[in-house]
Amino acid sequence: MAKRAVSLSHELHLLFKALQGARALVEQWIASPPDGSLGAGELPPAVSTILVLLTERLRLLDRVARGTIDPRLLLCPENEALGRSEREEEDVTLPVWSERQLARHHRAEWKRAKTSAERASRKEEGST
């Protein structure tokens, strides 16, 4: 079985399409006469929602690209690298972590959290 991976190209195209959708909504809102449902200068709630989703998806993509979280958290049918077609040969793929990589990552996070808690405890003891 082939290892699952996120296609960076597919993910960027998804984000681009969402951005185009937000732009289309804004253009439609500008072109349509005000119906009084929104205050002056207010954007439709759908635009704000799309922008929040784009922001959070970009943050997630950034963390995956830096290797701080498993690409599995970003993986969806629309961005999955399916095969090795000629076009996908040039794509950057982000393979999901193996169980071993995932365990190693969680172990390191646990050690960092434990060290941080111990430091905070010592600091608290020293201030009393």
Image: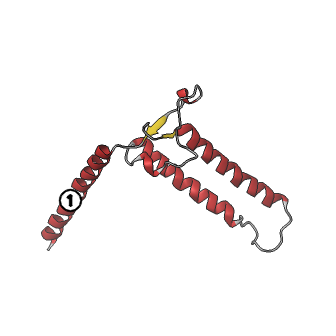
Q: Residue at image x 55%, y 47%?
A: 77
Q: Quadrant of the N terminus?
A: top left
Q: Residue at image x 72%, y 67%?
A: 42
Q: Is residue 17 above or below residue 53?
A: above
10 Å neighbourhood of mark 1: few (<14), some, or many (≥20)?
Answer: few
Q: Is residue 6 above or below residue 23?
A: above
Q: Residue at image x 28%, y 44%?
A: 100
Q: Residue at image x 71%, y 65%?
A: 44
Instruction: Give coordinates of residue 111: x percent, y percent.
Output: 21, 54
Determine the residue located farthest toward the right in the rendered image: 33
Instruction: Give coordinates of residue 79: x percent, y percent.
Output: 55, 44
Count of numbered badges drawn on the protein: 1
Determine the residue located farthest toward the front in the rendered image: 1
Q: Is residue 46 left or right of residue 123?
A: right
Instruction: Give coordinates of residue 4: x percent, y percent.
Output: 45, 41
Q: Is residue 115 left or right of residue 101?
A: left
Q: Is residue 25 left or right of residue 5?
A: right
Dot 1 lies on which element? helix
Q: Which residue is mark 1?
A: 114
Tell me which colouring the rendered structure shows. secondary structure
Quadrant in the picture for residue 119? bottom left
Q: Is residue 93 above or below residue 118?
A: above
Residue type, label 1: Lys
Instruction: Give coordinates of residue 126: x percent, y percent.
Output: 13, 68
Q: Quadrant of the C terminus?
A: bottom left
